[in-house]
Image (spheres, rainbow, N blue to C red):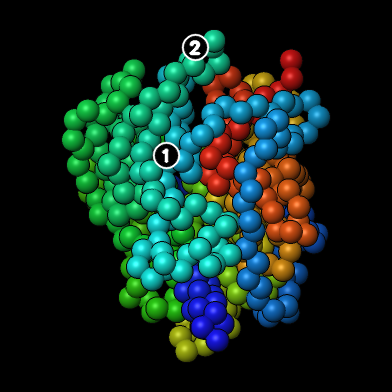
């Protein structure tokens, strides 16, 4: 009887977890665009037009956590023919995000979810604990240099952080997005460590549902603003909207952290954040809501309209009302919700986003988007656990989503995976780096020849 009660407690605790208008597919009311690009949602062909979505609760909400078993010696992810996958760095401590500086230095933030109190005591009994690192967070940034030579170098660049994720260099300043604030440090190109104290120039709301602790940062072409992604503090505002102030948003601030405004809202967890080369349009990869069934709601990538609202929590993928918001339906907010540009699959946990701006990959990949999919827990069959590619033409998605880096799932029948990809970044030599946090590895994908 005690065992049954313990499992019930564990289940309860861990289940809660300035743009050109021509660059956007939706009008100001969020009406669907005419683009009919297709991709996959849970393995099913999906037309981006929103009327093709299944109804809510068409299938039961599943709790299906993977089990990370690590990478055996000699095993690596699989890329398409014509590419080679090598281990860029191993034996890291939950490498979550990659930032590549103008001088080619590669910075990796290492951090993870930490559980405390009764959750920490019960963690070993939960299947969730086998799907990710839940121990003490490393809270550091590691620097890699001369990585393609016979004498690669790595340095502990910065420590004493609070769940760092996004990083950014502007002038002689190094910015870090901790989970609770934006930090600024003095920096000069070539530094191998930060040795002077930094300062918090902006406080951010901390905590959140199912790892929504990550804060990403990017800057615009002028490098006079910083854009910060802040995920929701809940699945679908079940703790009330007072808990969601400055959350499910992309914030804009000046380089000193002042002048904050909400650049875009209604984005449940916009972890992937990148300005599109050539157009100056901000794009995001959004990890959408849970518990509406296997095929709802599709994660997506989308261009971000200044002042735009993208639905959360009142609606999803445009103007589909969330049935769980009946007590506060807000039809006015549903009506203004913008339809995202491109769905990339329900429950895939699409968290990484970069545009291919290198020269070594074949022309097919030029200007397209790579998306890191961390993988599902709320679907009856595992989905995600790979890096996908979305081809672009003239600044817009232009074709089917394609698998690019796979092989992370070891045995689907046993729910076993080798690792889980998150961040993606293009190196100066044109190769692609992929952060595999649960696998404690950075993978490098290079084009043959």
Q: Is residue 4 left or right of residue 43?
A: left
Mark 1 and mark 2 residues within 8 Å of each other at the beta carbon: no
Residue 264 visible here: no
Q: Which mark is residue 151?
A: 2
The alpha-carbon separation of the residues under discs 1 and 2 comes to 22 Å
Residue bearing the label numbered 1: 109
Residue 195, percent from left and from top: 22, 28
Q: Is residue 351 visible?
A: yes
Placement of the C terminus among the 4 image quadrants:
top right
Q: Residue at 76% of width from left, 56% of height from top? A: 412
Residue 120, image x and y in percent? 41, 64
Question: 206 left or right of 29?
Answer: left
Q: Nearer the viewer, mark 1 or mark 2?
A: 2
The kind of secondary structure element at disc 1 is: strand
Q: Is residue 403 above or below residue 448?
A: below
Disc on res. 97 = none
Can you give x and y, in whole percent of width and height, for residue 85 in the image?
A: 69, 29
Name the residue: 78% across, 59% down.
Answer: 413
Which image quadrant for residue 209? bottom left
């Amino acid at each position: 009887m005690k065992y049954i009660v313990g499992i019930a407690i564990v289940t309860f605790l861990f289940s809660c977890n300035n743009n050109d208008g021509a660059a956007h597919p939706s009008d100001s009311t969020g009406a669907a665009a005419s683009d009919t690009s297709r991709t996959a949602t849970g393995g099913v062909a999906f037309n981006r037009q929103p009327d093709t979505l299944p109804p809510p609760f068409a299938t039961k909400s599943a709790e299906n956590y993977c089990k990370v078993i690590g990478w055996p010696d000699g095993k690596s992810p699989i890329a398409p023919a014509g590419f080679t996958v090598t281990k860029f760095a191993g034996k890291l401590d939950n490498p979550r995000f990659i930032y590549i500086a103008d001088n080619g230095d590669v910075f990796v933030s290492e951090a993870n979810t930490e559980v405390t109190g009764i959750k920490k005591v019960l963690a070993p009994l939960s299947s969730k604990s086998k799907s990710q690192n839940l121990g003490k967070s490393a809270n550091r940034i590691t620097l890699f240099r001369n990585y393609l030579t016979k004498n690669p170098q790595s340095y502990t660049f910065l420590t004493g952080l609070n769940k760092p994720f996004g990083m950014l260099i502007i002038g002689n300043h190094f910015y870090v997005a901790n989970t609770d604030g934006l930090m600024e440090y003095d920096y000069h190109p070539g530094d191998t460590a930060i040795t002077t104290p930094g300062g918090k120039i902006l406080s951010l709301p901390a905590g959140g549902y199912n790892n929504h602790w990550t804060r990403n940062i990017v800057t615009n072409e002028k490098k006079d603003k910083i854009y910060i992604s802040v995920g929701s503090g809940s699945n679908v505002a079940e703790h009330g909207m007072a808990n969601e102030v400055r959350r499910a948003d992309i914030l804009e601030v000046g380089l000193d952290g002042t002048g904050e405004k909400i650049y875009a809202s209604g984005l449940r967890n916009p972890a992937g954040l990148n300005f599109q080369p050539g157009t100056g349009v901000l794009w995001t990869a959004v990890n959408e809501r849970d518990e509406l069934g296997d095929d709802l709601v599709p994660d997506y990538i989308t261009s971000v309209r200044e002042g735009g609202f993208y639905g959360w929590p009142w609606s999803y993928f445009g103007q589909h009302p969330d049935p769980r918001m009946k007590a506060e339906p807000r039809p006015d907010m549903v009506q203004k919700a913008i339809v995202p540009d491109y769905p990339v699959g329900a429950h895939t946990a699409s968290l990484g986003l970069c545009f291919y701006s290198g020269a070594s990959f074949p022309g097919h990949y030029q200007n397209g988007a790579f998306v890191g999919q961390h993988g599902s827990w709320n679907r009856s069959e595992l989905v995600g656990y790979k890096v996908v590619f979305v081809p672009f033409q003239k600044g817009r998605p232009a074709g089917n989503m394609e698998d690019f880096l796979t092989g992370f799932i070891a045995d689907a029948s046993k729910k076993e995976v080798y690792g889980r990809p998150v961040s993606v970044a293009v190196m100066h030599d044109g190769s692609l780096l992929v952060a595999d946090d649960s696998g404690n590895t950075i993978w490098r994908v290079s084009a043959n020849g």
